[in-house]
Amino acid sequence: MVEKDGCYSCLAALRVLRVSLVDELEGQIDSLLEILVSQEVFTRDDREEVLCQLGPRARVRNVLDILACKGEEAAEIFLSIRSHHQQEAQKPSEEGHTDQPQFVEYNKVKQKHKDFLTRRSESMLFYNTRHGEKILFSEHYVNLLLADGHQCLERKRHEVLTFGQKRLSMQQKSAVHRKIAPAELFSSANGNRPVKKVLVSGVAGIGKTILVQKMLFDFGGNRDHLGFDFIIHMTFRDLNLIDKPTNFRKLVLRKNRHLSKELDAILANDKKLLIILDGFDEFRHYRSCDVDAFVTEPDEDAEVVEVVGSLMQGELLPNASVMLTSRPTAINHIPVGCIDRFVLITGFSLAEVQDFFLRYFQDSAIADCMFAVVSANELMLTLCYIPAFCYIVCCILKESKDLCGESPKTMTDIYLQYLVALLRSHTQARAETFRQEQRAGAVQKQSDIVLKLGRLAFQKLMEHQTLFYSSDQDVAELEGCSLVSTFLDKTVAQEPGCTEEVYSFAHLTVQEFFAAVYCAVTDDPLPDVLPHTSSRAEGSNNGHLDLFHRFLSGILSERNANLLSRQVGLSCNKDKVDIYRQRIIRELTMLCENRAQILNHLHCLFEQQDPSLALAVQPNTLHVNVSDETLSQMDYNAIKYFLNLTKGNISELDLTGTGVSCEALRDMQPLLLRCNRLW
């Protein structure tokens, strides 16, 4: 209690203890309320007002609010009742200590669960893993860099495009962002408050699901130090299949039948329970998790979003620890205040990229040679910090050394080589299967399948969807085609009485690339190169289609259009190529004259790698506005590419709010000397 003017203030004590009282009393609030009414501290109307609150924690808060209005005497009686409750609660705990779930059966189930998790996590599913191929997790896992902190909730640009610069910034500020190990995720950095709810965020392909697998693998083999008895793992793509009321107990037992006999004991001992919810951004209800209708018991039926929301907000199993993983796109929909720790996966360091190459190629000489090739290409090296992209680069290097006479210069170059490399690999690896299908007359041309994949990618990208279900008509059209497994990952979700297959592209950027291929080779009209600046400022785009537009520009370039036609059998419409070139010249000219943001247009121009296009941009006054974007090296390359091809003075170059460094300014010095105005 707090001393004031020589006496102790119980009201002040309630204010000081408010947060801890909510945690302490949520399980006792109903009985506590009856005592307050019986001792005439509360009226029946007070009780009704409290009972109208949704969830025990909200009821405790309401009780404290009412007490604050009733004065010092009411607060003193309440604290006396609370003290008596504490003493009573300790008695059965002390007398029944041996009744805690630490007996033989509980420990048997604990070990059985660890064995189960070991079997489930011992193999690593690489993209394009061939059927029956088993890759041991322990031999191929490469450490990920984890750091305290999270990405800004306001997204102006595509998450992958900003990643390289943020990754380098993280390296430079390692003293600010403390590097942490997976086993430390629930350890408080300062020890002031317990860490119960952890959010792990990172861009697509950065390794969120692999981190989860690492935790399950270590827990199963007794290699972790998290201190939990049980870890329950659920994925949101699996939870998406539930369309009727359910409860937490059913959710656990869907994939963990072996826990049924001891589940009551496990849930009763929830301080020793960790629940991992993987892929929050994939949850079809992620915008609705800030629920106000809570469930408080594991057996209480409700919509799946209410069960998840109650778990996240601590109304259900309040003592359990919860770990959420999510891409940055969805984290601003997580209920405010329910996260104790924000953790950012920043991918690989340079040493980890080298380690990945060694594990992938399984030969140190080849790995060193391939890493040297990547190190000489700034674009490829920057993107290799993303594990999924690192795999794509290794795949290209392994399968297609002879595809191009020069190192790829643009994102489109890299992804087109990836497409051709996997098509070639598929044809070679499945030559006999292909001949059998051919004899049976069941062969679809590769170009037709790529086109169908492109249509699926394009339609779902426009709908902001990255998961596709077997019941979807566009997915059903791809059934029975062995090539599909080369580009789509498949998981099988089982429900009582039905099995649903869930598909996604190996990486978000692969979906964007296929969508751009479809858009380039079909007769559909071209989308705008970029939505109007006004709609962008209102948050309708947030960079969602930036990379799609860059891929589209790169595919419509002469050199890549020829490669696509020659290697894949898909031809870009000549009229569409001409229309696109005229449009990008016209829009860049207009944007320069109007001082509008032009960064993504500059990237689209860069993807074309055609100097005549830049020379054709001749505004009356050349205003280059790239302000209010944290610029990466790729951004500087696109800006320099354009300005080096223009002639004469630059009326204005606006670098306001870009975080431009002294090094970058020195690199751009010849261009800066041409500027009449520099911001």
Image (cartoon, helix red, strand yellow):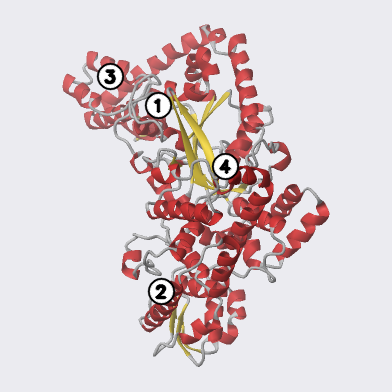
Q: Residue 281 placed where, x, y %?
A: 44, 45
Q: CA distance from mark 3 to mark 4?
A: 76 Å
Q: Residue 639 placed where, x, y %?
A: 52, 77
Q: Name which residue lies at 46% across and 37% down.
A: 237
Residue 17: name its quadrant: top left
- Residue placed under numbered mark 4 in the picture: 440
Amino acid on which the number 2 mark rests in the picture? Gln
Amino acid on which the number 1 mark rests in the picture? Leu
Q: Earlier in the sequence, mark 2 or mark 1?
A: 1
Residue 532: name its quadrant: bottom left
Q: Earlier in the sequence, mark 3 or mark 2?
A: 3
Q: CA distance from mark 2 to mark 4?
A: 55 Å
Given this view, does label 3 or label 2 mark the residue nearer the observer? 2
Q: Earlier in the sequence, mark 4 or mark 1?
A: 1
- Residue placed under numbered mark 1 in the picture: 316
Given this view, does label 1 or label 3 mark the residue nearer the observer? 1
277 relative position to 74: left or right: right
Give the class, few, some or many, for how many residues have Cα within 10 Å of label 3's Cα (few <14, many ≥20).
many
Residue 396 vertical position relative to residue 185 in the rendered view, above or below: below
Label 2–label 4 contact, CB within 8 A: no
Q: Secondary structure at mark 1?
A: loop
- Residue placed under numbered mark 3 in the picture: 33
Label 3–label 2 contact, CB within 8 A: no
Q: Secondary structure at mark 4?
A: loop
